[in-house]
Image (spheres, helix red, strand yellow):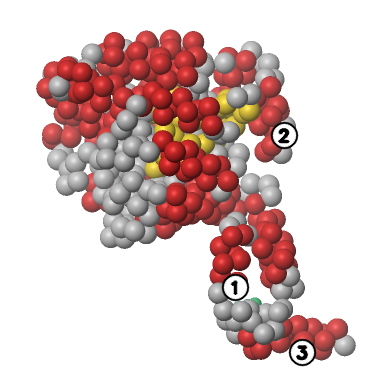
Amino acid sequence: MEKELAKKGIISEGVKEVAKRESLSPEEVAESVRKGEVIILKHKNKYLGIGKNLRTKINANIGTSPDVVDIELEIKKLKLIEKYGSDTVMDLSTGGNIDKIRKKIIEESDIPVGTVPIYQAAIETIEEKGGIVKMTPDKIFEVIEKHAKDGVSFMTLHCGVTLKTLERLRKNPRKAMVVSRGGAFLISWMVVNEKENPLYQYFDRLLEIAKKYDFAISLGDGMRPGGIVDATDNSQIEELLTLGELTEKAWDENVQVIIEGPGHLPINEVGPNVILEKKICKGAPFYVLGPIVTDIAPGYDHITSAIGGAIAGWYGADFLCYVTPSEHLSLPGCEEVVEGVIAARIAAHVADIGKGIKGSAEWDFEMDIARTERNWEKERELSIDPEKFDKLRKKFPTSEKDVCTMCGKYCAIKIVEKYLRTKIEH
Ligand code: SF4
Protein backbone atom coordinates (compact mmCIF):
# COMPACT_ATOMS: atom_id res chain seq x y z
CA MET A 1 0.00 0.00 0.00
CA GLU A 2 1.99 2.98 -1.31
CA LYS A 3 -0.10 5.60 0.49
CA GLU A 4 0.11 3.84 3.84
CA LEU A 5 3.90 3.54 3.59
CA ALA A 6 4.24 7.19 2.58
CA LYS A 7 2.10 8.25 5.54
CA LYS A 8 4.42 6.30 7.82
CA GLY A 9 7.42 8.05 6.29
CA ILE A 10 8.72 4.88 4.64
CA ILE A 11 10.37 5.23 1.23
CA SER A 12 8.97 2.29 -0.72
CA GLU A 13 10.50 0.47 -3.70
CA GLY A 14 7.79 2.07 -5.86
CA VAL A 15 8.71 5.57 -4.70
CA LYS A 16 12.41 4.90 -5.33
CA GLU A 17 11.78 3.64 -8.86
CA VAL A 18 9.41 6.49 -9.76
CA ALA A 19 11.80 9.09 -8.31
CA LYS A 20 14.71 7.69 -10.32
CA ARG A 21 12.79 7.60 -13.56
CA GLU A 22 11.37 11.10 -13.11
CA SER A 23 14.67 12.66 -11.89
CA LEU A 24 13.14 13.69 -8.56
CA SER A 25 14.16 12.96 -4.99
CA PRO A 26 12.46 9.97 -3.29
CA GLU A 27 11.37 12.29 -0.46
CA GLU A 28 9.63 14.59 -2.92
CA VAL A 29 7.74 11.70 -4.54
CA ALA A 30 6.85 10.14 -1.17
CA GLU A 31 5.40 13.45 0.02
CA SER A 32 3.21 13.71 -3.11
CA VAL A 33 2.03 10.10 -2.60
CA ARG A 34 1.23 10.90 1.05
CA LYS A 35 -0.85 13.91 -0.02
CA GLY A 36 -2.60 11.90 -2.75
CA GLU A 37 -1.22 14.12 -5.51
CA VAL A 38 0.69 11.19 -7.02
CA ILE A 39 -0.36 7.57 -7.36
CA ILE A 40 1.97 4.66 -8.02
CA LEU A 41 0.69 1.76 -10.11
CA LYS A 42 2.37 -1.62 -9.90
CA HIS A 43 2.53 -4.20 -12.66
CA LYS A 44 4.80 -7.27 -12.55
CA ASN A 45 7.30 -5.66 -10.16
CA LYS A 46 7.48 -2.47 -12.22
CA TYR A 47 6.13 0.86 -11.01
CA LEU A 48 4.56 3.83 -12.75
CA GLY A 49 3.90 7.19 -11.12
CA ILE A 50 1.06 9.46 -12.22
CA GLY A 51 0.52 12.95 -10.84
CA LYS A 52 2.01 16.27 -9.84
CA ASN A 53 5.49 17.18 -11.08
CA LEU A 54 5.77 13.91 -13.01
CA ARG A 55 5.85 13.43 -16.76
CA THR A 56 2.30 13.49 -18.17
CA LYS A 57 1.26 9.88 -18.80
CA ILE A 58 -0.99 8.45 -21.48
CA ASN A 59 -3.38 5.51 -21.62
CA ALA A 60 -4.57 3.53 -24.64
CA ASN A 61 -7.78 1.50 -24.70
CA ILE A 62 -8.14 -1.84 -26.40
CA GLY A 63 -10.72 -4.61 -26.07
CA THR A 64 -13.36 -6.54 -27.94
CA SER A 65 -16.87 -5.34 -28.75
CA PRO A 66 -20.05 -7.44 -29.18
CA ASP A 67 -19.48 -7.32 -32.96
CA VAL A 68 -15.69 -7.75 -33.15
CA VAL A 69 -14.22 -10.52 -30.99
CA ASP A 70 -10.64 -11.29 -32.01
CA ILE A 71 -8.26 -11.86 -29.14
CA GLU A 72 -5.22 -12.09 -31.46
CA LEU A 73 -6.07 -8.66 -32.84
CA GLU A 74 -6.29 -7.22 -29.32
CA ILE A 75 -2.87 -8.65 -28.40
CA LYS A 76 -1.46 -7.24 -31.64
CA LYS A 77 -2.86 -3.82 -30.64
CA LEU A 78 -1.37 -4.22 -27.16
CA LYS A 79 2.08 -4.86 -28.62
CA LEU A 80 1.76 -1.78 -30.85
CA ILE A 81 0.62 0.33 -27.90
CA GLU A 82 3.72 -0.71 -25.98
CA LYS A 83 6.01 -0.21 -28.98
CA TYR A 84 4.73 3.32 -29.61
CA GLY A 85 5.07 4.32 -25.95
CA SER A 86 1.76 4.26 -24.08
CA ASP A 87 2.26 4.20 -20.30
CA THR A 88 -0.82 2.08 -19.53
CA VAL A 89 -3.47 0.06 -21.33
CA MET A 90 -7.14 -0.40 -20.50
CA ASP A 91 -9.03 -3.54 -21.49
CA LEU A 92 -12.57 -2.41 -22.28
CA SER A 93 -13.75 -5.76 -23.67
CA THR A 94 -17.49 -6.23 -23.97
CA GLY A 95 -17.59 -9.22 -26.34
CA GLY A 96 -16.51 -12.87 -26.20
CA ASN A 97 -15.02 -14.52 -23.14
CA ILE A 98 -14.21 -11.39 -21.12
CA ASP A 99 -12.35 -13.28 -18.36
CA LYS A 100 -10.11 -15.06 -20.83
CA ILE A 101 -9.33 -11.87 -22.78
CA ARG A 102 -8.48 -9.91 -19.61
CA LYS A 103 -6.18 -12.65 -18.28
CA LYS A 104 -4.40 -12.87 -21.63
CA ILE A 105 -3.92 -9.08 -21.81
CA ILE A 106 -2.51 -8.97 -18.25
CA GLU A 107 -0.20 -11.88 -19.02
CA GLU A 108 1.09 -10.29 -22.24
CA SER A 109 1.28 -6.70 -21.02
CA ASP A 110 4.47 -5.01 -19.86
CA ILE A 111 2.57 -1.90 -18.74
CA PRO A 112 -0.12 -1.48 -16.03
CA VAL A 113 -3.57 -2.73 -17.05
CA GLY A 114 -6.84 -1.01 -16.17
CA THR A 115 -10.42 -2.27 -16.55
CA VAL A 116 -14.04 -1.17 -16.13
CA PRO A 117 -15.66 -4.04 -14.18
CA ILE A 118 -19.23 -2.70 -14.46
CA TYR A 119 -19.18 -3.68 -18.16
CA GLN A 120 -18.71 -7.33 -17.33
CA ALA A 121 -21.17 -7.26 -14.42
CA ALA A 122 -23.86 -5.71 -16.64
CA ILE A 123 -23.19 -7.88 -19.71
CA GLU A 124 -23.19 -11.15 -17.75
CA THR A 125 -26.41 -10.15 -15.96
CA ILE A 126 -28.08 -9.36 -19.30
CA GLU A 127 -26.91 -12.73 -20.71
CA GLU A 128 -27.86 -14.74 -17.61
CA LYS A 129 -31.06 -13.01 -16.50
CA GLY A 130 -32.27 -11.16 -19.57
CA GLY A 131 -31.90 -7.59 -18.34
CA ILE A 132 -29.49 -5.26 -16.57
CA VAL A 133 -32.14 -4.33 -14.00
CA LYS A 134 -31.59 -7.75 -12.40
CA MET A 135 -27.94 -7.00 -11.65
CA THR A 136 -27.24 -7.30 -7.91
CA PRO A 137 -24.70 -5.31 -5.88
CA ASP A 138 -23.03 -8.66 -5.04
CA LYS A 139 -22.52 -9.32 -8.75
CA ILE A 140 -20.75 -5.96 -9.18
CA PHE A 141 -18.41 -6.55 -6.24
CA GLU A 142 -17.71 -10.16 -7.28
CA VAL A 143 -16.55 -8.94 -10.71
CA ILE A 144 -14.41 -6.20 -9.14
CA GLU A 145 -12.75 -8.78 -6.89
CA LYS A 146 -12.18 -11.11 -9.84
CA HIS A 147 -10.39 -8.35 -11.80
CA ALA A 148 -8.33 -7.48 -8.72
CA LYS A 149 -7.28 -11.12 -8.23
CA ASP A 150 -6.15 -11.26 -11.86
CA GLY A 151 -3.72 -8.40 -11.24
CA VAL A 152 -5.52 -5.34 -12.65
CA SER A 153 -3.60 -2.22 -11.53
CA PHE A 154 -6.44 0.33 -11.72
CA MET A 155 -10.18 0.20 -12.27
CA THR A 156 -12.66 2.75 -13.52
CA LEU A 157 -15.60 2.76 -11.11
CA HIS A 158 -18.47 5.18 -11.66
CA CYS A 159 -19.16 5.85 -7.98
CA GLY A 160 -20.29 9.45 -8.47
CA VAL A 161 -23.47 8.76 -10.47
CA THR A 162 -25.95 9.06 -7.62
CA LEU A 163 -29.71 9.62 -7.27
CA LYS A 164 -28.85 13.24 -6.54
CA THR A 165 -26.94 13.46 -9.84
CA LEU A 166 -29.95 12.02 -11.68
CA GLU A 167 -32.22 14.58 -10.01
CA ARG A 168 -29.83 17.29 -11.19
CA LEU A 169 -30.00 15.81 -14.72
CA ARG A 170 -33.82 15.81 -14.67
CA LYS A 171 -33.93 19.46 -13.62
CA ASN A 172 -31.26 20.42 -16.17
CA PRO A 173 -31.84 18.23 -19.23
CA ARG A 174 -28.99 17.67 -21.64
CA LYS A 175 -28.87 17.72 -25.40
CA ALA A 176 -26.38 14.83 -25.76
CA MET A 177 -27.56 13.01 -22.60
CA VAL A 178 -25.15 10.34 -21.23
CA VAL A 179 -22.36 8.80 -23.32
CA SER A 180 -20.43 6.87 -20.68
CA ARG A 181 -21.14 3.13 -21.11
CA GLY A 182 -20.58 2.48 -17.41
CA GLY A 183 -22.70 5.49 -16.51
CA ALA A 184 -25.49 4.33 -18.83
CA PHE A 185 -25.53 0.80 -17.32
CA LEU A 186 -25.73 2.19 -13.79
CA ILE A 187 -28.30 4.87 -14.59
CA SER A 188 -30.67 2.38 -16.22
CA TRP A 189 -30.31 0.08 -13.18
CA MET A 190 -30.93 2.94 -10.74
CA VAL A 191 -33.93 4.36 -12.61
CA VAL A 192 -35.77 1.03 -12.93
CA ASN A 193 -34.92 -0.27 -9.45
CA GLU A 194 -35.32 3.17 -7.84
CA LYS A 195 -32.22 2.47 -5.81
CA GLU A 196 -28.93 4.22 -5.11
CA ASN A 197 -25.82 3.34 -7.13
CA PRO A 198 -24.26 0.35 -5.28
CA LEU A 199 -20.77 1.68 -5.99
CA TYR A 200 -21.70 4.83 -4.04
CA GLN A 201 -23.88 3.23 -1.39
CA TYR A 202 -21.36 0.49 -0.57
CA PHE A 203 -18.23 2.52 -1.22
CA ASP A 204 -16.70 1.11 1.98
CA ARG A 205 -17.00 -2.40 0.55
CA LEU A 206 -15.18 -1.22 -2.56
CA LEU A 207 -12.42 0.30 -0.43
CA GLU A 208 -12.00 -3.00 1.43
CA ILE A 209 -11.40 -4.85 -1.86
CA ALA A 210 -9.04 -2.11 -3.09
CA LYS A 211 -7.03 -2.37 0.14
CA LYS A 212 -6.92 -6.15 0.03
CA TYR A 213 -5.61 -6.32 -3.55
CA ASP A 214 -3.85 -2.94 -3.66
CA PHE A 215 -5.26 -1.45 -6.87
CA ALA A 216 -5.97 2.22 -7.57
CA ILE A 217 -9.51 3.47 -8.06
CA SER A 218 -10.12 5.65 -11.07
CA LEU A 219 -13.29 7.47 -10.08
CA GLY A 220 -15.21 7.40 -13.36
CA ASP A 221 -17.12 10.28 -14.89
CA GLY A 222 -20.41 8.68 -15.82
CA MET A 223 -21.86 12.15 -16.39
CA ARG A 224 -19.18 13.42 -18.70
CA PRO A 225 -20.61 15.58 -21.48
CA GLY A 226 -21.08 13.73 -24.75
CA GLY A 227 -20.79 16.90 -26.82
CA ILE A 228 -19.50 20.39 -26.21
CA VAL A 229 -23.16 21.46 -26.07
CA ASP A 230 -23.38 19.98 -22.52
CA ALA A 231 -19.88 20.87 -21.30
CA THR A 232 -19.39 21.86 -17.66
CA ASP A 233 -23.11 21.54 -16.93
CA ASN A 234 -24.88 20.96 -13.62
CA SER A 235 -24.85 17.14 -13.79
CA GLN A 236 -21.12 17.03 -14.56
CA ILE A 237 -20.31 19.35 -11.66
CA GLU A 238 -22.69 17.54 -9.29
CA GLU A 239 -20.80 14.30 -10.01
CA LEU A 240 -17.44 16.02 -9.54
CA LEU A 241 -18.51 17.25 -6.10
CA THR A 242 -19.36 13.67 -5.12
CA LEU A 243 -16.02 12.43 -6.47
CA GLY A 244 -14.28 15.03 -4.29
CA GLU A 245 -16.01 13.64 -1.18
CA LEU A 246 -15.23 10.03 -2.14
CA THR A 247 -11.58 10.91 -2.77
CA GLU A 248 -11.14 11.92 0.85
CA LYS A 249 -12.92 8.78 2.07
CA ALA A 250 -10.57 6.64 -0.02
CA TRP A 251 -7.52 8.52 1.24
CA ASP A 252 -8.60 7.90 4.84
CA GLU A 253 -8.29 4.19 4.02
CA ASN A 254 -4.99 4.68 2.16
CA VAL A 255 -6.53 3.78 -1.19
CA GLN A 256 -4.97 5.58 -4.15
CA VAL A 257 -7.33 7.57 -6.37
CA ILE A 258 -7.36 9.27 -9.75
CA ILE A 259 -10.27 11.33 -11.05
CA GLU A 260 -11.65 10.90 -14.56
CA GLY A 261 -12.78 13.94 -16.47
CA PRO A 262 -14.42 15.04 -19.68
CA GLY A 263 -14.95 14.12 -22.47
CA HIS A 264 -16.06 16.90 -24.77
CA LEU A 265 -15.19 20.50 -23.87
CA PRO A 266 -14.82 23.69 -25.90
CA ILE A 267 -11.23 24.89 -25.80
CA ASN A 268 -12.00 27.79 -23.45
CA GLU A 269 -13.42 25.41 -20.83
CA VAL A 270 -10.52 22.94 -20.75
CA GLY A 271 -8.35 24.93 -18.34
CA PRO A 272 -11.20 25.84 -15.96
CA ASN A 273 -12.19 22.14 -15.77
CA VAL A 274 -8.68 21.18 -14.65
CA ILE A 275 -8.65 23.96 -12.05
CA LEU A 276 -12.06 22.82 -10.74
CA GLU A 277 -10.98 19.18 -10.47
CA LYS A 278 -7.77 20.05 -8.65
CA LYS A 279 -9.67 22.26 -6.17
CA ILE A 280 -12.64 19.99 -5.55
CA CYS A 281 -10.63 16.75 -5.41
CA LYS A 282 -7.81 18.25 -3.32
CA GLY A 283 -5.05 17.79 -5.89
CA ALA A 284 -5.85 14.15 -6.80
CA PRO A 285 -4.37 13.24 -10.22
CA PHE A 286 -6.68 14.12 -13.13
CA TYR A 287 -7.23 11.57 -15.91
CA VAL A 288 -8.85 13.27 -18.90
CA LEU A 289 -10.59 11.39 -21.69
CA GLY A 290 -9.33 13.55 -24.53
CA PRO A 291 -10.84 16.05 -24.07
CA ILE A 292 -12.25 16.49 -27.56
CA VAL A 293 -12.54 20.21 -28.33
CA THR A 294 -14.84 20.10 -31.36
CA ASP A 295 -17.46 17.57 -32.41
CA ILE A 296 -17.39 18.09 -36.18
CA ALA A 297 -14.31 16.04 -37.06
CA PRO A 298 -15.08 12.30 -36.96
CA GLY A 299 -12.09 10.48 -38.41
CA TYR A 300 -9.76 13.07 -36.88
CA ASP A 301 -10.59 12.81 -33.19
CA HIS A 302 -7.00 11.86 -32.40
CA ILE A 303 -6.29 15.48 -33.39
CA THR A 304 -9.28 17.11 -31.65
CA SER A 305 -8.38 15.21 -28.46
CA ALA A 306 -4.65 15.97 -28.72
CA ILE A 307 -5.46 19.69 -28.82
CA GLY A 308 -7.62 19.31 -25.69
CA GLY A 309 -5.12 16.97 -24.03
CA ALA A 310 -2.21 19.37 -24.55
CA ILE A 311 -4.13 22.25 -22.98
CA ALA A 312 -5.48 20.09 -20.14
CA GLY A 313 -1.99 18.76 -19.45
CA TRP A 314 -0.52 22.23 -19.46
CA TYR A 315 -3.12 23.30 -16.88
CA GLY A 316 -2.13 20.34 -14.70
CA ALA A 317 -3.97 17.22 -15.93
CA ASP A 318 -1.71 14.25 -15.19
CA PHE A 319 -2.95 11.41 -17.36
CA LEU A 320 -4.38 11.58 -20.89
CA CYS A 321 -6.55 8.86 -22.37
CA TYR A 322 -5.88 8.54 -26.07
CA VAL A 323 -8.59 8.90 -28.66
CA THR A 324 -8.21 7.19 -32.04
CA PRO A 325 -9.42 8.36 -35.46
CA SER A 326 -12.09 5.65 -35.15
CA GLU A 327 -13.79 7.38 -32.20
CA HIS A 328 -17.56 7.72 -32.80
CA LEU A 329 -17.20 5.53 -35.93
CA SER A 330 -16.00 2.00 -35.14
CA LEU A 331 -13.74 -0.22 -33.07
CA PRO A 332 -10.17 0.93 -33.84
CA GLY A 333 -7.82 -1.32 -35.80
CA CYS A 334 -4.02 -1.46 -35.48
CA GLU A 335 -3.35 1.62 -37.61
CA GLU A 336 -5.80 3.79 -35.66
CA VAL A 337 -4.39 2.57 -32.34
CA VAL A 338 -0.90 3.69 -33.40
CA GLU A 339 -2.20 7.09 -34.56
CA GLY A 340 -4.03 7.52 -31.25
CA VAL A 341 -0.95 6.69 -29.17
CA ILE A 342 1.31 9.04 -31.15
CA ALA A 343 -1.23 11.88 -30.97
CA ALA A 344 -1.66 11.46 -27.19
CA ARG A 345 2.12 11.29 -26.69
CA ILE A 346 2.55 14.53 -28.63
CA ALA A 347 -0.15 16.17 -26.47
CA ALA A 348 1.51 14.95 -23.26
CA HIS A 349 4.94 16.13 -24.45
CA VAL A 350 3.59 19.57 -25.40
CA ALA A 351 2.06 19.80 -21.91
CA ASP A 352 5.34 18.75 -20.32
CA ILE A 353 7.23 21.53 -22.10
CA GLY A 354 4.71 23.97 -20.61
CA LYS A 355 4.95 22.32 -17.19
CA GLY A 356 8.74 22.55 -17.28
CA ILE A 357 9.22 18.79 -16.85
CA LYS A 358 12.94 18.01 -16.95
CA GLY A 359 14.13 16.68 -20.31
CA SER A 360 11.04 17.74 -22.29
CA ALA A 361 12.13 21.02 -23.89
CA GLU A 362 15.67 19.62 -24.09
CA TRP A 363 14.39 16.93 -26.47
CA ASP A 364 13.10 19.70 -28.77
CA PHE A 365 16.31 21.70 -28.45
CA GLU A 366 18.31 18.70 -29.69
CA MET A 367 15.96 18.37 -32.66
CA ASP A 368 16.32 22.09 -33.40
CA ILE A 369 20.09 21.73 -33.67
CA ALA A 370 19.87 18.54 -35.75
CA ARG A 371 17.43 20.26 -38.11
CA THR A 372 19.66 23.31 -38.46
CA GLU A 373 22.59 21.02 -39.23
CA ARG A 374 20.39 18.98 -41.59
CA ASN A 375 21.56 15.93 -39.71
CA TRP A 376 18.87 13.61 -41.03
CA GLU A 377 20.04 10.57 -39.11
CA LYS A 378 19.85 12.46 -35.83
CA GLU A 379 16.48 13.97 -36.76
CA ARG A 380 15.15 10.48 -37.41
CA GLU A 381 16.51 9.22 -34.10
CA LEU A 382 14.88 12.10 -32.22
CA SER A 383 11.52 11.93 -33.98
CA ILE A 384 8.55 10.55 -32.07
CA ASP A 385 7.70 8.23 -34.98
CA PRO A 386 10.86 7.26 -36.93
CA GLU A 387 8.89 4.96 -39.24
CA LYS A 388 6.72 7.82 -40.44
CA PHE A 389 9.88 9.94 -40.73
CA ASP A 390 11.36 7.35 -43.14
CA LYS A 391 8.14 6.94 -45.08
CA LEU A 392 7.76 10.64 -45.81
CA ARG A 393 11.47 11.32 -46.32
CA LYS A 394 11.49 8.67 -49.04
CA LYS A 395 8.25 9.78 -50.68
CA PHE A 396 9.92 12.24 -53.07
CA PRO A 397 13.65 11.43 -53.21
CA THR A 398 15.97 14.42 -53.47
CA SER A 399 19.03 14.80 -55.67
CA GLU A 400 20.78 16.88 -52.98
CA LYS A 401 21.11 14.59 -50.00
CA ASP A 402 21.47 17.28 -47.32
CA VAL A 403 18.14 19.01 -48.04
CA CYS A 404 14.59 17.80 -48.57
CA THR A 405 12.27 18.12 -51.56
CA MET A 406 10.21 20.86 -49.92
CA CYS A 407 12.59 23.60 -51.16
CA GLY A 408 15.33 21.50 -52.78
CA LYS A 409 18.28 23.64 -53.91
CA TYR A 410 16.56 26.68 -52.40
CA CYS A 411 16.76 25.18 -48.90
CA ALA A 412 16.57 28.21 -46.61
CA ILE A 413 18.73 26.67 -43.92
CA LYS A 414 21.46 25.79 -46.41
CA ILE A 415 21.41 29.24 -48.03
CA VAL A 416 21.66 30.97 -44.66
CA GLU A 417 24.42 28.62 -43.62
CA LYS A 418 26.37 29.34 -46.78
CA TYR A 419 26.04 33.13 -46.92
CA LEU A 420 25.03 34.55 -43.57
CA ARG A 421 27.17 32.34 -41.37
CA THR A 422 30.24 32.87 -43.53
CA LYS A 423 29.63 36.63 -43.42
CA ILE A 424 29.16 36.65 -39.63
CA GLU A 425 32.21 34.50 -39.11
CA HIS A 426 34.29 36.88 -41.29
S1 SF4 B 1 14.59 22.14 -47.99
FE1 SF4 B 1 13.23 23.59 -46.93
S2 SF4 B 1 11.94 22.29 -45.61
FE2 SF4 B 1 13.68 21.02 -46.30
S3 SF4 B 1 15.22 21.23 -44.71
FE3 SF4 B 1 15.68 22.85 -46.18
S4 SF4 B 1 14.53 24.64 -45.42
FE4 SF4 B 1 13.70 22.85 -44.36
Q: Which residue is mark 1?
A: 394
CA separation in Å, label 2 and label 3: 46 Å
Neighbours of disc 1 within 10 Å: few (<14), some (14-19), many (20+) = few
Q: In the rendered view, tell whether residue 360 sits above or below residue 88.
A: below
Query: Image quadrant of residue 410?
Result: bottom right
Mark 1 or 3: the one toward you: 1
Three-letter amino acid code at the position of disc 2: Lys
Neighbours of disc 3 within 10 Å: few (<14), some (14-19), many (20+) = few
Q: Which residue is mark 2?
A: 20
Q: Residue at x 24, y 35 (%)?
A: 235
Name the residue nearer the viewer: 193 or 404. 404
Q: Position of residue 311 (x, y in %)?
A: 46, 52
Q: Is residue 324 left or right of residue 319?
A: left
Q: Position of residue 295 (x, y in %)?
A: 29, 56
Q: Are marks 2 and 3 in contact (CB under 8 Å)?
A: no
Q: Which one is earlier in the sequence, the residue at label 2 or at label 1?
A: 2
The answer to whether the beta carbon of the residue marked 3 is less than 8 Å from any atom of ligand 1 is no
CA separation in Å, label 2 and label 1: 39 Å
Q: Residue at x 64, y 46 (%)?
A: 357
CA separation in Å, label 1 and label 3: 29 Å
Q: Which residue is mark 3?
A: 419
Query: Image quadrant of residue 415?
Result: bottom right
